[in-house]
Image: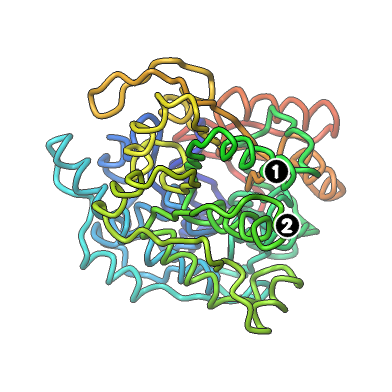
Amino acid sequence: MQSKMYFYGGAGSVTGSNFMLDTGGRKILVDCGLFQGEHALDESNWEPFKFDPKEVSVLINTHAHIDHIGRIPKLVRDGYTGKIISTEATKALAEPMLYDALELNRHEAQKHGKEPLYDEKDIEKALSQWEGIPYHEEHDLGDGITFQFYNSGHILGSAMAKFSRDGRSIVFTGDLGGGNSPLLPLAEEPQGVQYLVMESVYGDKKREDDTNRRERLEDIIEDTIARKGTLLIPAFSTERTQDLLFEIRTLMLEKKVPSVPVYLDSPLADKITEAYMRYPTYFNEDIEKRIEGGEHVFDFPELHFVRDVEESKNIYKKGEPRIILAGSGMSNGGRVIGHEQVILSDEQSTLLIVGYQAAGSLGRKLAEGMKKVTIHAETVQVRAKVATMYGYSAHMDGEQLLEFVNKMDDTLEEVFVVMGEPASAGFLVQRIRDYLGTKAISPEVGAVATIEL
């Protein structure tokens, strides 16, 4: 039998993940995320869906990052009434993520002179349609299609979705973790797969040796404290913040770095961290045992949760060295902007960039070494030390992505490389063809492919 694949988002770019598998009798949507870039909410999010939401049979969600879930309430508002299915942990994380994005949604709508994409009622309705299921549990979607989740190792509860019919399968990877988290198990390797729709965020890069990442973090903390400065870490509220809290906690408990205040200036990250503690079975075996034994793996005496904006501003009233973790991870919104406005001109301080920075974002400009940036209409001279450390990256690098494909190569017939900038996706496509001899393409937005499924 034949099915059709539609690439509505996440093709030709990293964000806006949105794919449809049309099996003839079912229209299965995979992810429905926000488009992001220079702005946290791109204008393209207001464009109508390229399909009728009322005709979608089921929505399968791979994980809780906003570029994979951010337009789900809009989908519901526009008429989708079917099930939304993810892992249990993804559903738990999606709720605070969507409510947090609501204020940004309203702000950007006002700035663009548009109506907000959705409101609280749309989120409530989406959550009422949402079902959480475990990894590996097989579900019948009708039209002869079954599906199950596999762990993708990206963030807590993240999953690959495998769809099968008549002994043939297609896997949507979502985002693939590179095994760098001290908290998560490694990504699984589904077998017996004919078609693969895979991410390529770092498809053209080989990550630095990360075996000593905790030691490097230790060095950066010690250096900043010795200069009596502030270490500011823009970090995504989901996964990167929890990884770093765990690592900083470990360094301080083991007395490997001086004891200084650590401020988590992100109400969202606070809620996400609480949600993490409710799902110990999604962690790696060691962390699961520690949590079930009663240990709070993110809490330590130096940690302070910053609840409101006024408290955020008061952080600097004390002249002591400090560590601040704040969102967003790409410096394109959130409280981190205010902190960057304060510390970037301070040569005693350090900005530590720890994750992917989208083209055009403030974080990308800083990572590329710009010495003068504009924040809230103010020109800021960059005198602070800007360090990058990708050892905690939540994505596979190019070598790992190629090896991931290689381990499926016995049955693979075609690979669709998506969720990467054009250069990154194109480079990975060429390597899959050259090294593995497997058919691979990087589809453009709006592309349609016919597959034997």
| Quadrant of image for the N terminus | bottom right
Q: Is residue 355 visible?
A: no
Q: In the rendered image, which quarter is residue 418 located in?
A: top right
Residue at 56%, 67% (x, y): give it.
Answer: 300
Q: Is residue 119 left or right of residue 180?
A: left
Q: Is residue 223 left or right of residue 446?
A: right
Which mark, residue 396? 1
Mark 2 touches mark 1? (CB < 8 Å) = yes
Question: For the residue marked with disc 1, what is the amino acid?
Answer: Met
Q: Residue 147 in the image: state x and y as whole percent.
A: 62, 68
Specify which label sits upstream in the sequence, 2 or 1: 2
Q: Is residue 91 above or below residue 43?
A: below
Q: Is residue 373 visible?
A: yes
Residue at 46%, 30% (x, y): give it.
Answer: 363
Question: For the residue marked with disc 2, what is the amino acid?
Answer: Ala
Q: Residue 144 in the image: state x and y as whole percent.
A: 60, 70
Report crowding for label 1: few under 14, some 14 to 19, many 20 or more residues within 10 A (C-alpha).
many
Q: Residue 107 in the image: state x and y as whole percent.
A: 20, 44
Residue of label 2: 187
Which mark, residue 49? none
Q: Is residue 255 left or right of residue 93?
A: right
Residue at 41%, 36% (x, y): give it.
Answer: 331
Q: Is residue 250 left or right of residue 174?
A: right
